[in-house]
Image (tube, rainbow, N blue to C red):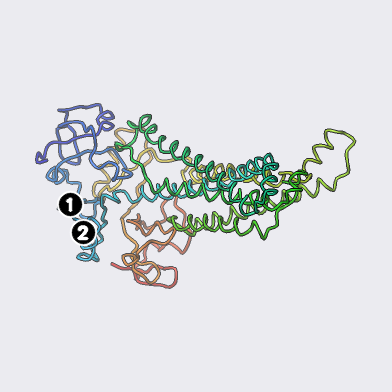
Amino acid sequence: MRDASAIWLVPALAQRLGIGRGATVRLGVADFTVAGVIASEPDRLGEGFTLGPVAIVSLAGIARTGLVQPGSLYETKYRVRLSPGASPTAAVDRFKAAFPTGGWETKTRDRAAPGAERFVDRMGQFLLLVGLSALVIAGIGVGNGVSSYLAARRSSIAALKVLGGTSGLIAKIYLLEVAVVAAMGIVAGLVAGAATVPLIVWLAGDVLPVAPSFALQFGPLALAAAYGMLIALAFTAPPLIEAGSIPAAGLLRGVFGNRPVPLRRTLPWVVGAGAAIVALALSTAEQPGLSAGFLAAVAGVLLVLAAFGWAIRRIAASLPRSWRPLLRLAIAGLHRPGARTGTLVVALGLGLTLFVLLAGIRTSIDANIALTVPKRAPALFALDVPPDREADFRRTVEGIAIHPVIRTVPAMRGTITGYGKTRVADLKTLPEGAWALRGERGITFSATLPEGSELTGGRWWPREYRGRLWFRSTSDWRRPST
């Protein structure tokens, strides 16, 4: 784009100004002719948040505006086309090695929007953990279903035992049946999940910022299948082991489901499957610490709910028998042999816990927004106003608005160069929550504390301060870098 007097506007800006192609627009101190309205903004997805609508001009046009002056807040980006077959990651590494203190920020086609990628990864991790918790609830239902199925098949199991079938053989037979059924359910779930992607593309393809395409991601599908099979194994092991351990005479008398299975026989299977699930979740997590904390919290909730279910059975067993038949039968059903009181309490309690978790997250976000956004927010923010043009800016605003309230704060931009005793540039990964180390931060050199601001630590330098400039780090006092 070589025409220094041409400008291209996004549709929102053209609509706001009520102009079209051929109109004249003033940008800074220069006039431009609208050469067209942008139908598709280049690299829009990788730009992230913008403070205002976009206009495209040439470099010569930028120079004509007079907006870029010493101390102006602006950003320059270069697009580099590599030769075919070249590795973008290797090119970035060589670039950083050549300019170690240049302060450059690099992006590749694999990481065009790091902030969006971090958000998607963390949201995916959160949904994965919530999905695991939902699978636990489903596993409880699967275990109850398998137990009911085996109870209905106790005559067949007894016949196998009479004919010489061992406990291990019977457990293997029905484990194979359960595995086949679980595999069929997992395949159906994977097909439904994969088919949802083109459906979303068809329904919301025009709304998305990029043109999506359908592609099977075999890694996530295999991970989901592994989770489903491990959950099925963990919750079907107790009834399968019970079916093989009860003698034939007991099965014929209807003993199945009426006595607990020894922990020494079921615990290795349940603990082994649970350990495999935890190891799989932590090995594939972007933040293993967060995932471990979430899984530990879920395990703690399961233990509390299991104890609550056990307490309900004991309390129901200790209550006196009611003279009302319906109430007596209801209480007896809570503690009778083979009652599923504990598993139902765990399933319902964990499901309610997940709903409360999601509602709590939404409430926390809404409350944070309500506390952060002031009740009387400014109608307009203007950045990078030169000090010698402040009077012109005030006259312009006063000529448009009725009795405007204008407050100006001297500001500049700066980066945090050190974290403790380590340079930020030397950190391979930023610490959790250290978002202030990423990019530039706003700094003010106002003589007094700006109105609406709160001083949370230290003290404001007096207006007549002329001493040395120091800042306080987390561990000691240091002189700031220039």
Residue 251, how many percent across, how many down? 73, 46
Q: In the image, residue 24 lies at what x, y percent?
A: 16, 31
Q: Is residue 87 above or below residue 3?
A: below
Are the residues flagged by discs 1 and 2 in contact, CB closer than 8 Å? yes
Q: Is residue 87 left or right of residue 250?
A: left
Looking at numbered disc 2 in the image, what kind of residue is underneath it? Ala
Q: Considering the numbered disc 2 on the image, is that residue within a helix, a strand or a loop?
A: helix
Label placed on residue 49: none
Q: Which residue lies at the image location 79% right of the left edge and 50% below the top edge? A: 314
**250 or 100: nearer the eye?**
250
Q: Is the N terminus in the top left, top right, bottom left or bottom right quadrant? A: top left
- Say which residue appears at 46% left-offset and 50% top-offset: 125
Residue 267 placement: quadrant = bottom right
Residue on which the image places disc 1: 80
Q: Earlier in the sequence, mark 1 or mark 2?
A: 1
**Quadrant, the C terminus:** bottom left
In this picture, residue 8 sits left or right of residue 117: left
Q: Nearer the viewer, residue 396 or 76?
A: 76
Crowding at dot 2, Cα within 10 Å, few <14 / some 14-19 / many 20+, comes out as: few
Report which residue position mark 2 lands on. Answer: 91
Q: Residue at x 48, y 50 (%)?
A: 226
Q: How many marks?
A: 2
Q: Amino acid at mark 1?
A: Val
Element assignment for label 1: loop
Which residue is nearer to you in this view: 284 or 266?
A: 266
Which mark's residue is nearer the viewer, 1 or 2? 2
